Amino acid sequence: MLKKIKIFSVIILVSFLYCGILGMLFNNVSTVPVFSSQASDTIDLPIVMYHSVLKDPSSSGKYVITPAELENDIKYLKNHGYSFVSGSDVISYTYNNTPLPEKPVMLTFDDGFYNNYSYVLPLLQKYDAKAVISIVGQYTDEYSESNIQNVSYSYLRWSDIYDLFLSHRTDVGNHSYNFHSNTDGRNGAKRNKNEDLEQYKTLFYNDTAKTQETCLSKTGFAPEIYTYPFGSYSTETTDILKEMGFKMSLICEEGINHISHDPNSLFLLKRYNRPSGIYSSDFFCKWEQK
């Protein structure tokens, strides 16, 4: 009899352990969709940084590529399943939960060269692509006044920027009004060492606002994207940009961005600078291997 009681006790104990293990397994399984859902809300976004685009190969270098190189880049990305997104697309994903494609990539062009209008826009139209073109307000004012149109050296005029806006292929970014000239020894828009913080904030605000206000008066819209000249920034400026209505900022550090529904994920976005003289496949493996 005692032996039967012991056997029965062992059976009960094993049953409890079995049920406990099953419960743990089912509890763990039930949490998987939660983590999966959270992970799916974050999207990896590589961003390419271009500048000037010129046909003459002798002008090519770290910040100048040929139209043929740009076209090869666009074709390579399309052939490898990437979808071109604008800054507005990414902003809409974060703020409005508007879906983004599975493999998004963003093309950006700094400084607002006139050749972006001549060479870049036709390629965007040809391949159904999008880009961000960031302008320096002072340069745009100067070339709007002189009305010079030269692909080798001139910059976009306000009339060109309005055409870009109407094309629905580009977002226009604010690349400062005069921080790109570096005439006073400042490193882009970065705060100088020992510079009074409040004076710096005022200086940064006024420079940024000048491009915003001029763009609004000349074209009817104001940028939502701020692109730091030379990629140099100070941490204090993010709050200023947010207060001014900016939704995104771009720097020059390299790396993949992780975009979520948190608006903070759209600031200080990293980019890969695209130099001339390298095959598209060799350049884009920078992030494809990661």
Image: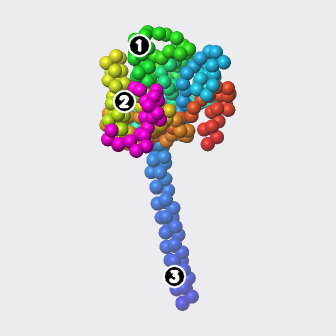
Viewer-nearest of discs 1 and 3: 1
Q: Secondary structure at mark 1?
A: helix
Q: Quadrant of the N terminus?
A: bottom right
Q: Depth check: give the residue in front, 29 or 280.
A: 280
Viewer-nearest of discs 3 and 2: 2
Range covered by the magenta-colored residues: 177-199
Q: Looking at the picture, which amino acid does disc 3 mark?
A: Ser
User: Looking at the image, which residue sits at the far bottom?
Assistant: 2
Q: Is residue 252 visible?
A: yes
User: Could you tell me which residue is drawn at 67 percent across and 30 percent down?
Assistant: 281
Whole-number angstrom distance, CA of label 1 to CA of label 3:
92 Å
Name the residue tied to disc 3. Answer: 9
Position of residue 89 measured from the top left corner of the image (x, y, whole percent): 43, 30
Q: Looking at the picture, which amino acid does disc 1 mark?
A: Ser
Left or right of 254: which side holds 207?
Answer: left
Mark toward the start of the polypeptide (1 vs 3)? 3
Q: Residues within 10 Å of mark 2 (few under 14, many from 20)?
A: many
